[in-house]
Amino acid sequence: MNRPPELEVVIVSHGAEDLLRRCLASLEAHPPSGAELRVTVVDSGSTDGTPDMVEREFPRVELVRAANVGFSAANNVVLRRTGAPYVLLLNPDTEVYEGSLDAALDRLAADPSLGMVGVKLVTPSGELDHACKRSFPTPLAALAHFTGIGRLEGASRSLSQYRATDLGDDEPGVVDAVNGAFMMVRREALEQAGPLDEGYWLYMEDLDWCRRFWIAGWKVFYEPAGTVLHVKGGSSGKRRRVRQEVAFHRGMGRFYRRFEAAESPGVLNLAVYLGIAAKLAVSLLITAVRTAR
């Protein structure tokens, strides 16, 4: 099997020094076999010792110091310049295990129709991070997911659709989308689909990117033969702050507007936007109550 001569890993970090240290150490401990590994950390305005730690403890890692320009823009610093045949966007709150990178690389090398591969993400408790394989959300599935109904045992397919429940957790297969914590892409597909949309500051850019890969004619694949630890929320915080809440809900609206609104009746569009606004209001109220405690 032909293997790529180089894999470029891009990690965008904003703080989370200890998590990033463990992430980089895991890459050193479990590099891909038969492929040259190149790692670039884009530090997006960290105010702690994160960039200094990278320079001091991981001298072979390229460090790019940038302002806090947002997740998409920070990744694009490298995506726009890379010449590597395969590129991996990796969150700093992840740790790769032995064989994880090989599993994704082998899958991409074996099937030229694939533009992106994600792997099985597990939480520190060992549970599956269900966002590692997803379907593009319908208004009904999104409502069911955020109210919790779609996550209940035995929920119908129309309600649980967002989590791609038709594909088993340990079953490899084509999916609509994978999670932004681990997205390995083929450079030819990247060149056709384009870099991440910088209209998303944080959140939803991964769903947007997967959608554009499909539009450009490239499949997205879930490969559970590779497993990666994901400390979900480790790099952005377990609870979203106000700016993050606003970014998340703006991202929801942007995704719907870009890909669904034009083909949906006006009354449905109004309902979706009002629903997003209502969810944002509730989320901000919860944030305010927690902050006041």
Image (cartoon, rainbow, N blue to C red):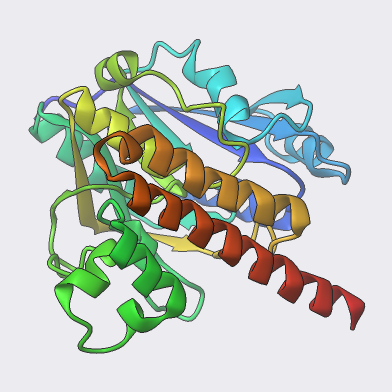
Query: Residue 76, position in %: x, y?
Result: 54, 22
The quarter of the image holding the C terminus is bottom right
In the picture, measured across the screen, residue 70 lies left or right of residue 153, that is: right
In the picture, measured across the screen, residue 24 lies left or right of residue 150, that is: right
**Residue drawn at (34%, 53%) of the image:** 268
Query: Residue 127, position in %: x, y?
Result: 39, 78
Query: Residue 191, position in %: x, y?
Result: 33, 13
The answer to whether residue 239 of the structure is visible from this angle is: no
Which residue occupies the extreme bottom position in the image? 153
Query: Residue 71, position in %: x, y?
Result: 61, 36
Residue 7 placement: quadrant: top left
The answer to whether residue 111 of the structure is visible from this angle is: yes
**Residue drawn at (80%, 34%) of the image:** 45
In front of the other: 43 or 246: 246
Classify 111 as above or below 66.
below
Which residue occupies the extreme front position in the image? 267
In the picture, measured across the screen, residue 52 lies left or right of residue 194, that is: right
In front of the other: 144 or 40: 144
The quarter of the image holding the N terminus is top left
**Residue drawn at (59%, 19%) of the image:** 77
**Residue drawn at (31%, 19%) of the image:** 187
* Count of numbered labels shown in the rendering: 0
Classify 129 as above or below 100.
below
